[in-house]
Amino acid sequence: MVDVNAIGKTIVDKVQSTHGVSGERTCGKIIYSGDGIIHISGLSDVKYNELLEVQGGFKALALNLERDSVGAVLFSGEDKVRFGDLVYSTGKTVQMPVGEGFLGRIVDPLGDPIDGLADIQAEEYRPVEFPAPAIMDRGKVNKPLQTGILAIDSMIPIGRGQRELIIGDRQTGKTAIAIDTILNQKGENVICIYVSIGQKASSLAKIISTLRNRGAMEYTCVVCSTADDDAPLQYLAPYSGCALAEYFMYHGKDVLIVYDDLSKHAVAYRTMSLLLKRPAGREAYPGDVFYLHSRLLERAAKLSPEKGGGSITALPIVETLAGDISAYIPTNVISITDGQIYLESELFNSGVRPAVNVGLSVSRVGGSAQRTAIRQISGQLRVNLAQYRELAIFMQFGSDLDAETQKTLNRGAKMTDTLKQRQYLNYSVREMIVLLTVSQSELVDKIPEKKMTAYNEGLLDYIHANHEELLEKIDPDKKTDDALRAEILSIAEDYVNCSVGEDSHQAQSDAEAEAEDAEISSDVK
Ligand code: ATP
Ligand code: MG
């Protein structure tokens, strides 16, 4: 007869003896080291994603748990670690120190400051990998996150707790949109985290100096891994940034996190996976590359009021090649996020900046968070612009246009000009309401072609100088009534009339100056 109880007891004893007492560290030996990858034998109790300590004070991350060995990637000491070195388990996954002290600082993905200033006092440590908030713990996205960019806030509104992808080819102003959004959070009680993944150190230095000079570092932390860093550090950076963001979110704060950019993140992960000899899939990315980004972006959320009501708004950036949004990583991230802002090189080069392609850009949840007055006037904007674009393509070759078509084309061109916006020139919600009201009125017919952008900027200066009370009267959370609309238009008309006069005067004096120049040059001859 077999004694079942005795067998059970033996199994329990065996399991307990192999796992040892908690707190004990096991130790293994490196049996392979190369390209930042180590294989270790003798580490039997290591968990996936556990932090390992390598002889010489280096750190590594356990990623491949195999039958006889553990595959890990080194965070540092790639050229110093040798065959036979000892490796200790720590029993902990990678943790990021977090706390208020991180605001205004520049740190590496392990939380160590790299700005040459004092050490940062961590309030606690958070695991870099953390489960996303459950559905029951989430609230509705109902508060806007203003980017200060007219084209985005009017047509692709972003709500706090949303994940909005910024996608486009290289040099199309992707980073510029993210940085403008961070700058616009001044005084809005939003904490910003800018995660740089594999960017050139020189571009990063420029971004940091912009944030510093414009007073945005007070509420911002930069987590950076540059192109010179090893792939594991680039891989870790967004998760570390997210851990820091979560600290603030679970303390009831609103956070904006920018991942610049996830294409480079995927490439870093691919490098690690190929070196670890994991099977390669489409475009040589490993099979779990979707999970790589989905588990990161799912952590951005709006918490319910019972959970403190904090939020993480994520702005991931993805770079495309020749506008191909159907490549592997772009399609993955598009399907994970709640919408995308699609930037086009063609628009960028033709001077439409920010180069937002309105037709291909969407925001799936931000609409409910949009301010009432903006929603009221921007409702027709998308349709009007689409009609204009269609007509403009159709009319490219036509010469004689009837008056009505000419008018639609004119208005469309002026609307497109209104949406052009210089970098670092953020509009407040009230200013946006003024600009949208004017650009959709008959007043635009009086403004000369190609002058719309300059007129808008001039108009806002004029209002700030002479009619500040008008801006105070506008309530973004209420519909703009006819009386207020008429008042906005009458002030705009005053400005248009006096500047059109000035313009013709200017044109006249320019012509006179030119004639004088011609006379002088003929005299010289
Ligand atoms: P990369 O692919 O190199 O990361 P990117 O898509 O992030 O590029 P940016 O670096 O943001 O692009 O912008 C490219 C250039 O365009 C910069 O020199 C920037 O100053 C300029 N730029 C961006 N937005 C605007 C704008 N709205 N008006 C004028 N210039 C702009
Ligand atoms: Mg960029």
Image (spheres, rainbow, N blue to C red):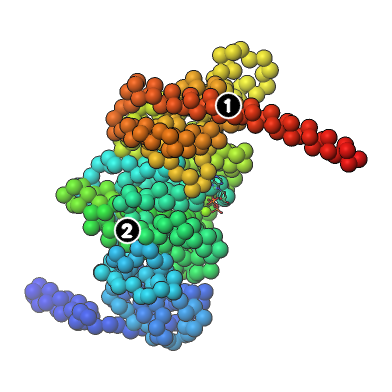
Q: Horizontal and vertical percent for residue 179? A: 46, 52
Left or right relative to 84: residue 474: left
> What residue is rendered at 16% in x and 49% in y?
306
Where, by quadrant of the figure, is residue 131 drawn?
bottom left
Percent from the top left, x then y, of residue 116? 44, 74
Residue sitting at x 31%, y 47%: 161
Quadrant of the rendered structure where residue 113 is? bottom left
- Asked where in the image residue 503 lies, by quadrant, the reply is top right
Amino acid beneath label 1: Val
Discs 1, 2 touching: Cβ within 8 Å: no
Q: How crowded is the residue under tag 2: few (<14 C-alpha within 10 Å), some, or many (20+)?
A: many
Q: Is residue 165 visible?
A: yes
Q: Which residue is mark 2?
A: 245
Name the side, left or right, on which 506 lies relative to 380.
right
Helix, strand or loop for disc 1: helix
Residue 312 visible in rendering: no
Residue lying at the far right in this picture: please name it.
525
Check disc 1 and report the residue beneath it: 500
In the structure shown, which secondary structural element does the residue marked by tag 2 occupy?
helix
Q: Answer with mark 1 or mark 2, whichever residue precedes in sequence.
A: 2
Residue 218 rendering spot, x and y as whole percentages? 37, 60
- The answer to whether mark 2 is within 8 Å of ligand 2 is no
Residue type indicated by callout 2:
Ala
Q: Residue at x 36, y 75 (%)?
A: 119
Q: Is residue 38 above or below residue 157?
A: below
| Residue at the image point whose x is 58% and y is 26% from the top | 500
